[in-house]
Image (cartoon, rainbow, N blue to C red):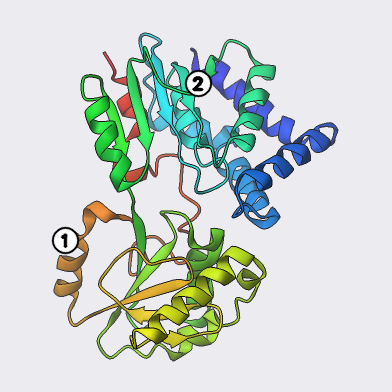
Amino acid sequence: MPQERFLSLIKALHQYFSDSSNEEKIELFIEKAKNENAWFSDYLIINAMKAIDEQFLNMQVWVNFFEKYPQNSMTSKRIGLILSGNLPAVGMHDLLMTLAAGHQVVVKLSSQDQALMKLYIDAIKSIDSQFIIDSVDRLSAVDAVIATGSDFSSGYFRNYFAKIPHIIRRNRSSVAVLTGNEKVADHEALADDIFTYYGLGCRNVSTIAVPTNFDLTPLFDVLTKVDWVLEHTKYSNNYQYHKTLLLLNQIPHFDLGNLIVTENEQLVSPVGVLHVHRYETENELSAWLSQHTEKIQCVVGSNSIPFGQAQMPALDDFADGVNTYEFLVNLS
């Protein structure tokens, strides 16, 4: 599939979701999505769809991407996609990368995120039927697989698809590194990295790494102002549950009224909880980050991803550090 045709698709998709005549249909699918997944509030869906439009449906972004990755697949293959459902239309990156590489898509949608993905798939098919996307209940007769799941399901996927090329993703979370030199604006941006999508995504900061003598008070003064998360029943219930659990187990923690903060060496924190890791030296910090490389999706702050940018990955900021596009175009 020529890249020019794919670029035309991207341009048309942007126009499709900007066209007022499609508003009623889009709103209908948004309502269906909210019924499928109790976490999918209007805020969550609108925020995700805006990010998709800005990051994935921007033709110039794709032009720049193809300048960096000019190669295309020599032969079209059937690529199986097993999608996650933790965030609205979270599988769009894999879907578009597969189409951009010139392949056909055989997709197994998550039961938690069918409506929005169907909305995008229907839009693609209505624009250009040459792009093949088949939705199935069970993958079969595929040439390669990209699967996103839990630590438990990833083991099953690796065994089941062992004989064909595959990318298997597991649970990951993100870390913010603070040094004590941050300004209020940095703390406000970090709040976005923590609370956006209610902390459900692998790019959400679930642990902050701070120096041993770090004063958390200035950060807490900012985080405690984020009260909109409590408007969501499931987030509020998670926050209350973990607060009660820590109190019953007499585990030291800070209660910010909207977030529980506790020192814990586990990278993945529950929804409504933020973990703190303290480090003495930069060498110790580097060793700790290296030790957990396989579980960290991204690192925010301290010469890494800027605060507030965790949820705005570039097209080539690939999940788990595995270049999806090169995997797809190099299939033999």
Q: How many marks?
A: 2
Q: Is residue 237 visible?
A: yes
Q: Which residue is mark 1?
A: 291
Residue at image point 66% right, 55% down: 41
| Above or below: residue 312 compared with residue 192 | above
Q: Considering the image in quadrants, where does the C terminus appear? A: top left
Could you tell me which residue is drawn at 70 percent across and 54 percent down? 42
Question: Mark 2 Cα within 10 Å, few/some/many (few <14, many 20+)?
Answer: few
Circle 2 sits in a helix, a strand or a loop, which is it?
loop
**Camera-nearest residue between 266 and 249:** 249
Q: Amino acid at mark 2?
A: Val
Q: How far from the left and from the top, in percent, is residue 273?
A: 43, 73
**83 and 191: which is toward the camera:** 83
Q: Nearer the viewer, residue 22 or 142?
A: 142
Q: Is label 1 in a helix, a strand or a loop?
A: helix
Q: Which mark is residue 25?
A: none
Q: Which residue carries the number 2 mark? A: 136
- Mark 1 residue type: Gln
Residues at marks 1 and 2, CA–CA distance in whole angstroms: 38 Å
